[in-house]
Structures are given as C-alpha cells and as structure tokens.
Image (spheres, grey):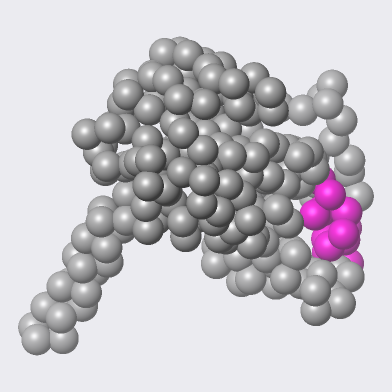
Amino acid sequence: MTKATTADARDIPEATVARLPVYLRALNALADSDVRSCSSEELATAAGVNSAKLRKDLSYLGSYGTRGVGYDVDYLRYQIAREIGVEQDWPVVIVGIGNLGQALANFSGFRSRGFRIVALLDADPTLQDKEVGGVPVLPFTDLDTIAAEHNVAIGVISVPAHAAQDVADRMVAAGISSILNFAPTVLSVPPGVDVRKVDLSIELQILAYHEQRKAHGESA
C-alpha cells in the first residue's frame, strides 16, 4: 500500500475535500462493525459514490489500496483524519443560541469528530447565564476575549440573516479565520477567511424540485 508524506502531498481539489468526511464517516461505520478491510466498491457503496470517483479521490492521499485485498480500514481512517485535521482538538464558538443554535450545541457528535465547543454567545440577555449542552451562554461582547483565550479558529453563525454580517465581521476582527454560516444570507469576508454556508431552505427546495420531476414523470 502506498503511503503519502507531507513532502509529496499534492493540492486536493475542493470537491474531493468535500467528500473526504463522507468517506471517514463510512470507514468509522465499517470499523464499528469490526470490518478490517474493504474493497473500493464496498467503501463506495457505504459512502454513496461510485467506485471510480472514490479511487481517484483517495489517490490524492497517496493511498491506492492493495490489489486483491482492498483498503485497510484503520489505516485509511488515519490517513483521512490526518488530512482533514480532525486528529486535532479544534475549539469552536457558536453565535446565536436560538432553536438552531441550541440544537447545534446539544449535538454530541462534535467532540468525537475533533471539535470542542468552548463558548456559546448571544446578544439576548435573557439567554445569558443559561447552559446548553453543558456550556454556558455568554454575552456576544465576550467574543474577542474568548477567541483569544481559546485560540478559536472556527466560528458558527446561527443568527437571523440581518445580523449575520455584523457577527462575521466581529469574528474576523477577533482572528477567527473559518466560518460555518447557517444564516440565509451571503457573507462578505476578506481573503484568507473561509466560509461554508448551510442553507436548509435551499436544500428543501432542491428536494422539492426532484419530487416535482418524479411526479411529472409518473403522470407523463
């Protein structure tokens, strides 16, 4: 099995980066079922992609598997976890502790995937001093202090759209360089700051489109 090193690592396409966590989740499930090795077809099925795409994606890591044996599940988990950085302990802040923010704060999967919520922040004084998921809700004005104290690199925005840009600006000013945005708006950030947007309404509309296509196909 070929192993990649930092020195010979190549730039990985963004589309491949987006699929690596999916492969890691599938590998974790296989490991939980005591599967020690798997073929590309088995892993592709578990991840919901075609095997040719999977093999190409994994080739960027320098892992081609072993002919007739397949992929070593534990080793490939290690490779992918190292590549995407989840072997580290990433401190995260969540701003906006409404229904969505509380659901995110209560999600138990962050810790097992390398993310530690160090603070929940909200401008609403009625929410402050409460605890969600064992983490106290603090004033939004504490962002700078918390970001510096915990060396926070990742911030989550779950505030209404009209407040999202101001929150993003404050995060950037506090030194946070990666933002996960749940607000239904496009954020403007300077170069060097990465933003990932999760818009649940758009995802539902995409599903509605496919449902409509299926309905029209059935009636045609």
Numbered range of the magenta stretch: 65-79
Can I make out residue 171 in this image?
yes
How many numbered circles does the render carry?
0
Q: Name the residue: 9% across, 86% down.
A: 219
Instruction: Give the image location of residue 154, x and y in percent.
Output: 57, 32
Is 95 positioned to the left or the right of 202 in the image? right
Residue occupying image coordinates x 63% and y 56% = 134
Residue placed furthest toward the bottom: 219
Q: Does 220 sit left or right of 14 as displayed?
A: left
Q: Nearer the viewer, residue 207 or 50?
A: 207
Question: Image check: 18 left or right of 124?
Answer: right
Is 66 placed above or below 56 here? below
> Residue 19 in the image: x percent, y percent?
57, 50
Magenta run includes residue 72: yes
Above or below, comparing residue 105 to residue 193 in the picture: below
* Percent coordinates x, y for residue 87 in the rendering: 80, 43
- Please check the rendered image and state whether residue 77 is part of the magenta-colored stretch, yes or no: yes
Foreground residue among 211 and 173: 173
Against 144, residue 67 (above or below) is: below
* 20 is higher (above) or lower (below) than 178: below
